[in-house]
Image (cartoon, rainbow, N blue to C red):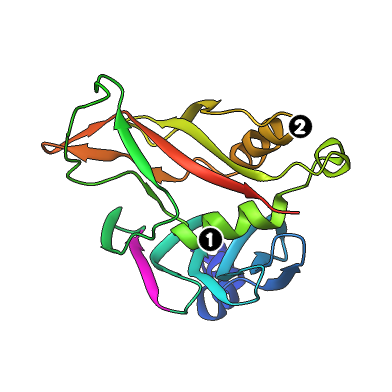
Amino acid sequence: MIKTFLLLMMLLPAILFGQETKRISDKATNETFFVLKSDKTTRHGEYNKFSYRNTLLIKGFYKQGLKDSIWECYNFDGQISLKYDYSKNELLFYKPSDKIKRYKFLNETENADTTINRPPIFLGGDDAFTSDIVRNLRYPVEALQNGISGKINVSFLVDKSGKTSNYKIEKRLGFGLDLEAIRVLKLQPDNWLPAIQNGQAVDIEVTYPVAFKM
């Protein structure tokens, strides 16, 4: 009994006041978050992510290193574009942007007109996806030297589990631009909800445009 009482007294401050945390501001990724002082690899507390324009894109909360409760994502205009409840693994709201241009079923013919009940959804929000592409994009020296610019459409698979693979270029520009477009897209986390068709998760091909401007 005495040992149990002493143990409870030792744990009481943590129970009453929570664990001590430290605020981190990562300028490289435009994120602010808290980590445990006892384990700086574990996020615990409020999380915010900002765009390359310094507008708020994501607001959420970590609990012992895991995303917890309701997270909100915003577009560049400051409007809510997505709400997701990580406690219930439930999508509460989604307003798509026009940045991701096309979706295609893998068995779809060129002239098929198949309606998707729900497209694959990036849980960071569409504009956060775009912001990270812009922030990480590096113009290849070879393309700069030759004055090459343009838009590259990159297609990739989002499978039934929300994982991405099979990145490819629809029309190549060369001069290092194709490889750079694929590189920045592969940097994005596999944080997708899969597409839904007839109540079932399905594999689907997403086409995303990456623009290179001089």
Question: Would you say 57 lies left or right of 42 here?
Answer: left
Between marks 2 and 1 in the image, the one whose residue lies nearer the viewer:
2
The residue under label 1 is 128
Residue 9 part of the magenta segment: no
Return the x and y of residue 11 as percentages of the image width and height: 57, 69
Q: Nearer the viewer, residue 73 or 114?
A: 114
Return the x and y of residue 188 as percentages of the image width and height: 58, 44
Give above or below for 180 relative to 98: above
Indicate the secondary structure of the residue bearing disc 1.
Answer: helix
Q: Residue at x 70, y 73 (%)?
A: 23
Q: Nearer the viewer, residue 33 or 148?
A: 148
Tell me if I can see residue 65 in this picture: no
Q: Which numbered disc flags the more N-terminal residue, 2 or 1?
A: 1
Give above or below for 52 relative to 157: below
Tell me the chief SS of the magenta region. Answer: strand
Which amino acid, mark 2? Gly
| Image quadrant where one finds the C terminus | bottom right
Residues in magenta?
79-85
Q: Residue at x 69, y 30 (%)?
A: 179
Which amino acid, mark 1? Ala
The residue under label 2 is 176
